[in-house]
Amino acid sequence: MNAALGQGGVILGVAASLGGVATLAVALRQRRLHLIAVGRSYALLALLGAVVAVVAMERALITRDFTVQYVADTGSHKTPALYNVATLWAALEGSLLLWVLVLTGYIALVVHKFRRRLGDPLVGWALLTMLVVSSFFFLLLLFPANPFHSFDPPPGFDGPGPNPLLQNHPLMAFHPPMLYLGIVGFTVPFAFAVAALATGRVGEGWLLETRRWTLFAWGFLTVGIVLGAWWSYEVLNWGGYWGWDPVENAVLLPWLTGTAYLHSVMVQERRGMLRVWNLSLLCATFSLTILATFLTRSGVIASVHSFTESDIGVWLLSFFGLIVAVTLGLIGWRGDRLRAPGRIDSPLSREGAFLANNVLFAGFAFVVLLGTVFPLIVEALNGDQLSVGAPYFERMTVPIGITLLFLMAVAPVLPWRKASGELLAQRLFWPGWVGTATVVVAVLVGAHGLAPLLAFGLGGFAAGSALRQLVLASRRQGWRGVVGRTNGGMIVHLGVVLIAVALAASSSYDTERELTLDVDDSATVAGHEVMYVGPRTVEQSNKTSIRARVSVDGHVYEPAINRFGEGETAVGTPAVATSPARDVYLALLQVPDDDNAGRIVLRVVVQPLVLWLWIGGAVMLVGTVLAAFPGRRRSPTAPVSEPPRQATGAPLLAPANGDGRVGSTDEEPVEVPT
Amino acid sequence: MTRTRLLGWLAMAAVLVAALAIGVADDGGPRTPEERARSLAETVACPACDGQSVAESDAAASRGIRTLIAERIDQGASDDAIRDELVATWGESILLTPDSSGVGGLVWVLPVVALVLALAGVTYVFWRWRGMAAVHASDADRALVDQALAPSTRAGGEDP
Amino acid sequence: MTSPVTPESATPDPGDDVAEAPPRRRTGLIVSAVVAVLAIGFVAVLATREPATDRRRDSPLIGKVVPPLAGETLAGGNFDIDDHQGRWAVVNFFATWCVPCRIEHPELDAFNRAHARSGDAVLVSVLFDDDPASAREFFDRNGGDWPVVLDGDGLIASAFGTPKVPESYLVTPNGRVAAKFTGGVTRDGLDRAIDQIEQAAADRGAP
């Protein structure tokens, strides 16, 4: 029953999406704009289809209904309840169900938000684009990746359960949904970008109206990536959190272009410039999400994270090609005509800083993309087998990161249009001292090495600049000084600084040792006493956990090796002694047993400041939420660069205008000298 | 800039340079053999695990390679000599970063080329802008703006 | 609902002294074209990549007689590949610490059971850089009853030139190495390869 219901939901989704596409195409072609509202019904039907399919699948998973193929492949009686729900996204087909649910949810939200403008062809085009995307993913669910095939379970059948790595940690329940809310969320601004290109209407407020969508999608993606790193740290047994694995890189790429977009869109708001560039960034971001999904699911690049491959690779690659072709075609055809006639007056200005930001982020994305696909390209060209691993990415991205930190410090104090050295010297004075103090403190606690010290110093500099902005805004506006785009953005910057400092510290000053210990043996690693207390075995419904009780500085932790199923796979689960100053990471490499006289082999990794990575991520989330805060209500089409002259000659808007933007960042500095 | 401000900046620069000098010079002593082995191991790919280095992986082959590296360092071999030996036994793909020569070198060169192109592009764009006269709004433009602003421009969509 | 204002459609005021849009540059078109060319190349490369499993590779051994493969097995007996002339052989190098090896294990098991019945192919594994006790436990837990040759000194692996696991070699009934797979095999992949090689041989009329 579940299979039939789920299959019905998918078919409904396919029919509704395709029907919507057809209706909207007719509506737009023949200018029968009232039909666009009909498109809304199709969108809601598609949502219904997705909901039905997901509910059917979850029901099947929770009741262990093995007549559904997907449950037979990934479910099991032994999987605990929470993980059964999360099994939805533990494998390829189910994760696509999550994708269509999120996608149709977003489409329904768009339809609701723009319900009074459904006669506008621009909205019609956007809806059309979104329904094309949803048609594609529903078709994937109907053909190559169908989870609702029927299965005839023999009596006493029990499924294998999801991959053991995905049953090991509750983060598995949150990381993929967050990631999908982010990645799928970029479909909405992309759809509007395509609509703008198709209709030629790039100069209006729609971009600002979708700004919040992009911000939310970006925020979710940020959280998804940080959770992924955290999951990697807590589950995979190697002591690191980011391995420059192809799947990790694939998901980082849209984040990078999305960040570039969030900054350069402000130039568009203020000066009306960079319109076509912003549209290109949105198209690139969406294309990269499709590329990411292709790389993850096609098995073209082997990775710890990738799903098993199937024919889906061909479909995804074709869709990627289609998207790239359509967007390049639109930009090539329309782009030049839609350019704004303005100019950026001086590189030393807020606009110049955002331009530099974009160049750096584009360069970052280029390096990551190149490193990830380079082995494939070389293999195609001359058959050589090359590896491009972490050392390459680190060497390339560290200079970019350091330059970005510097930019983060200087940009918030730059006014629009033009700045003078005088101004910078005045505004950057205290942030400069914060940066210098950070370097001094770091050296005093024993930090060394140019790269990390630069990171600390520039991080402090950037933090000082962000704090200065927040303090000034709060003085001016009270609690409103921490909400709105600029101030929320400063908080996000603070989060980034925390992450940058934590990254620099944990990668430059880590210590790793492999210890072989008998019971009651102890060793000292980086000043911490590690002692093996004894073994312990715990039986759980889905796994047997062989643990080693290890005391670190007196507290006992239990790194383990878990055996799942019939002992099919043994997966190591680390234990981490966390504290604000440093993490002591314990990975059990070899269990104590008769062969080795009860000895264990333990890898101990001591890394400073790892906790601040996750705290920084949380700060970024808080900042994103605050940045989305409405701020003082302002019409999206109101001009921002100069108040227009009306008949009365009075400016339309007061200088200290909405979003908590500090007035002093306008043309003439008005602030009290600090 | 006022005198005080200038002095303030100079003091900041002095403190910063001093701190950096101390920090960079005090390298924690010369690299111990273990540190050198570890840093070399981080650039060698584990033969059996996708993308991980022998420093991170706990596979037996990784352990073997780590032992080999440690032995060679004790015998006084240079980093490059050790890398060459590993490549000779296991092939190019044992190194996590391609060599700077040959096709592999492209992965190092292309980003630099891209950076140069980007800077050139930005410079060109600024030069072109400099040549442009500033845009002034004409009366016709102002009329257009007034027309757009006159009826309520709150067009339907509310914030979510 | 007022129709949206499109400044671009405004007619230029003849009285304007300046503010004409600069001559329309083709930058957008050129950049799009360049990116399109790169994208086409990129997609072509991706489209022609083989998946990470069942990856056929070049090897200097292909076409040559299979290197000597004889030794003590996990079960305590002796194995020699020369005893199995006249049958296809799959030589699989594996280790218990290797994750893709564990993933391919059920596939090998399926392959073994299918061909054990028909007797036309034999599967032999060679233990790579691992200790017999782990291997014994691995097979106890996961099933599988084909010979596993111990290669303590790594000579067999060297003879085959195997740097990493999993790696599998397909040997024809004549004792020649026909194919090399890296990154894990599947039962279907092996069967397909055997069919393909047999078909090619029949086409050529070669024995």
Image (cartoon, coloured by chain):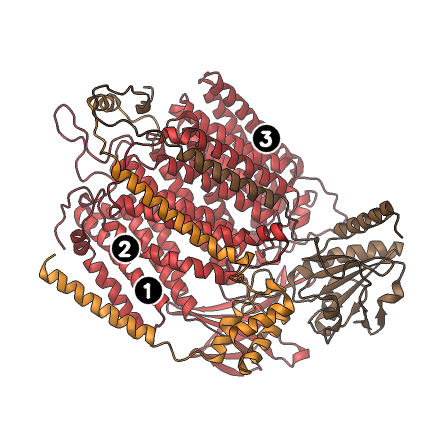
Which chain comes out red in the rendered image? A
Amino acid at the residue labelled 2: Ala
A326 or A156: which is nearer to us?
A326
Residue A263 in view of the camera: no
Q: Which residue is mark 1?
A: A454
- Of all chains, the one bearing label 2 is A
Amino acid at the residue labelled 1: Leu
The tint of chain B in the picture is: orange
Q: Which residue is mark 2?
A: A409
B146 or C142: which is nearer to us?
B146
Inter-mark Cα distance, 1 to 3: 54 Å
Q: Which residue is mark 3?
A: A14
- Mark 1 is surrounded, within 10 Å at the Cα level, by few (under 14), some (14 to 19) or many (20 or more) other residues, namely many
The percent coordinates of residue A177 (x first, y second) are 50, 47
- Per the rendering, the mark at residue A85 is none
Residue plotted at (29% across, 32% down): A341
Amino acid at the residue labelled 3: Val
Residue plotted at (31% across, 60% down): A459
Left or right of A92: which side holds A233? left
Inter-mark Cα distance, 3 to 2: 49 Å
